[in-house]
Image (cartoon, rainbow, N blue to C red):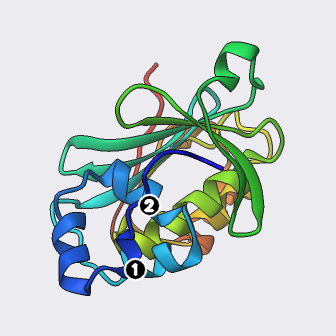
Amino acid sequence: MSDSPSFPFLRLPFLAIQNIVHNLSCTEITELSLCSRRSKRLMQSIRHPGLTDIEITIDRLRMYVALMNGFEVCSIWSIIKTGLNDENFRKLLRDGAIGSVHIKVLKFEGSHFTIDAQQQPENAIKVLVDHLKDVFKLPLTVLFEPFGLENYRRFLPIFPVCYRLYVYSSDKISEEELQFIKDNVVVEWQAEFYKSQK
């Protein structure tokens, strides 16, 4: 049993909780929302000003999800496929389920998290994005480069609806593949398709 003092946060009146949450960073709010179903519901019921969108970047070299305030990154989650070493295990924050997906979450400096997803990274990204959407109720901005990704179609269910979609190296995939993306992603505001730089 832990000797550290406890604080009955969830038993406080709603307005007191709301005032506390409004003084927390988006990283702290995210961590609170992952503690339990009750704490997630509570974070969902509170408006979180100062955040504009959830930005998803997926290409063959990097995969990450960020909570944004305009062009400022408030919190970032990198998805790695290389596995954890002994040094990384010391930074392990969570080894359990988010939704129905079991993931390992590491916390590094400040607001930087890493998710260990050696297999099926699309499942880890989707469950994280769904959780952040539930809590913060923000639109999605997606930066997607399908060229070079193994079976890029498996990533499309992460963002079936998004506010902005930017597809890079669109000239390196076939017209049929490009049309498949357009047919399977609903873009609410802006879609841009960029050619590779030669």
Establish if 102 lies above or below 147. below
Residue 172 occupies quadrant:
top right
Q: Which mark is residue 42?
A: 1
Give the amino acid at mark 2.
Answer: Leu
Residue at 57% across, 58% down: 128
Q: Is residue 39 left or right of residue 71?
A: right
Relative depth, front residue between 86 and 117: 86
Residue farthest to the right?
A: 119
Q: Which residue is mark 2?
A: 32
Residue at 30% across, 60% down: 53
Q: CA distance from mark 1 to mark 2?
A: 9 Å
- Return the x and y of residue 19 as percentages of the image width and height: 15, 71
Asked whether residue 182 is in view, the answer is yes
- Return the x and y of residue 195 as percentages of the image width and height: 45, 37
Establish if 92 lies above or below 49. above
- Return the x and y of residue 6 as percentages of the image width and height: 43, 58
Residue at 65% across, 43% down: 173
Q: Which mark is residue 121?
A: none
Q: Secondary structure at mark 2?
A: helix
Characterize the local packing of mark 1: few (<14), some (14-19) or many (20 or more) Cα atoms within 10 angstroms: some
Asked whether residue 188 is in view, the answer is no
- Return the x and y of residue 99 as percentages of the image width and height: 68, 69
Q: How many marks?
A: 2
Give the amino acid at mark 1.
Answer: Leu
Relative depth, front residue between 73 and 105: 105
Q: Is residue 104 left or right of residue 40?
A: right
Residue at 28% across, 50% down: 68
Say whether disc 1 or disc 2 marks the residue closer to the N-terminus: 2
> Looking at the image, do the residues carrying marks 1 and 2 touch, with CB atoms under 8 Å apart?
yes
